[in-house]
Image (cartoon, helix red, strand yellow):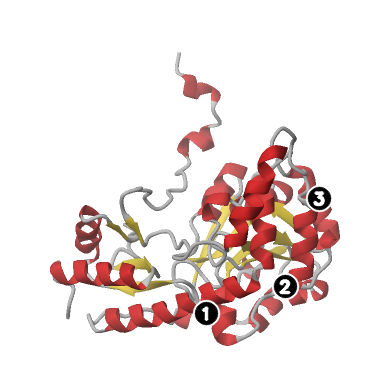
Amino acid sequence: MDPLRFVRPDVVALEGYVPGAQRADALKLNTNECAWPASPRVAEAVQAVVDGLVRYPDPLATALRVDAARHYGVTPEQVLAGNGSDDCLTMLFRAHLAPGDVVAAPDPTYGLYRTLAGVQGARYVGVPYGEGWAVPDLAATGARLALVAHPNNPSGTLAEVDALRRLADRLEGVLVVDEAYVDFAEAARGPCSLIPYLGAHPNLVVLRTFSKSFGLAGARLGLLFAHPALVAQYAKVKDSYNVDSFAQAAGRAALADTAHHRDVVARTLDERARLAAALAAFGWTFPDSDANFLLCHVGPDAERLYRALGDEGVLVRWWSRPDLRACLRISVGRPEHTDRLLDALRRHGAAG
């Protein structure tokens, strides 16, 4: 008996999302994690939870939602917590999409969007970015759910706030603005989040994560911001205890230590500038990044360099798809990480 006969045929045919390589012995510059540790307050908060592990966590992460609402200037009823922002995405796909519904996003972007559409039986439409990585017209697709990463992954480019607001007005569906990297953009440019505009656009959802600038990728914690009526519906389709007690405590502690957060973001921007200057000296080009990574156009040597770096334990991101196969995406590390990367690139003939 073939056990796959009991699995949905579209799931069998689905190409699953492939995360960046995970190697404990490697320098990981491939998954855009924070290069600096989380706030020291996080360890203290997590340790305090240990004795309470005999109980289930708060299923709605109430205290975290209250703290997040205060931090971001919204009400707790506008906030929902997830097991990473990927979990928040899963709630959105469950709540809004029936088989055959259209999901749209600019292309290229975060690959999980396409995978989640397939899991839901929805039809994914990737619309190519315009010149200068301008967000395309997603409203014309008839999407029930449209997603824009702001800044985008893998390009690191920021969308125009006014353009996103116009899209929300025109869309006959829900606009999800994925702000996983927006802390880096706001530190350099000033306010550019869509959270302040939730009241003006009832069909707007904004996602945030603790995996990047807060240094909590291993805790798996994300936040969803939306109209209270939508949040109430998303709470129905989330997993019952989707955010564990450790993650809830860690998130509250991270939000409270604003000085540490500002320092980590500033260090990241400083090292991004240094990395960009060094890679530009190789003759590589890249879009202006508002994130903690650079999408470098390397040319025909991209795959060779990717594999050579991997052999040395330096992980960067490479894709085989035609529009990205000449590129490497490189996360910003600490200064010693940049030094190791650059030394390895020079040894393998990357210098121009």
Amino acid type shown at disc 3: Gln
Q: Residue at x 66, y 57 (%)?
A: 251
Q: Identify the residue under disc 3.
A: 233
Q: CA distance from mark 2 to mark 3?
A: 19 Å
The reply to whether residue 300 is visible in this rendering is no
**Rendered position, 338 above or below 25:** below
In which quadrant is the N terminus drawn?
Answer: top left
In which quadrant is the C terminus drawn?
Answer: bottom left
Q: Identify the residue under disc 2.
A: 195
The residue nearer to you, when weighing 325 against 274, is 274
**Rendered position, 159 above or below 248:** below
Q: Identify the residue under disc 1.
A: 134
The residue nearer to you, when weighing 52 against 352, is 52
Q: Position of residue 94 (x, y in %)?
A: 69, 46
Q: Position of residue 98 (x, y in %)?
A: 69, 45
Q: Give the label, 2 or 3, closer to the camera.
A: 2
Q: Position of residue 224 (x, y in %)?
A: 70, 59
Mark 3 or mark 1: whose residue is earlier in sequence = 1
Amino acid type shown at disc 2: Ile
In this picture, residue 277 sits left or right of residue 311 = right
Mark 2 or mark 1: whose residue is earlier in sequence = 1
Amino acid type shown at disc 1: Ala
Q: Are marks 2 and 3 in contact (CB under 8 Å)?
A: no
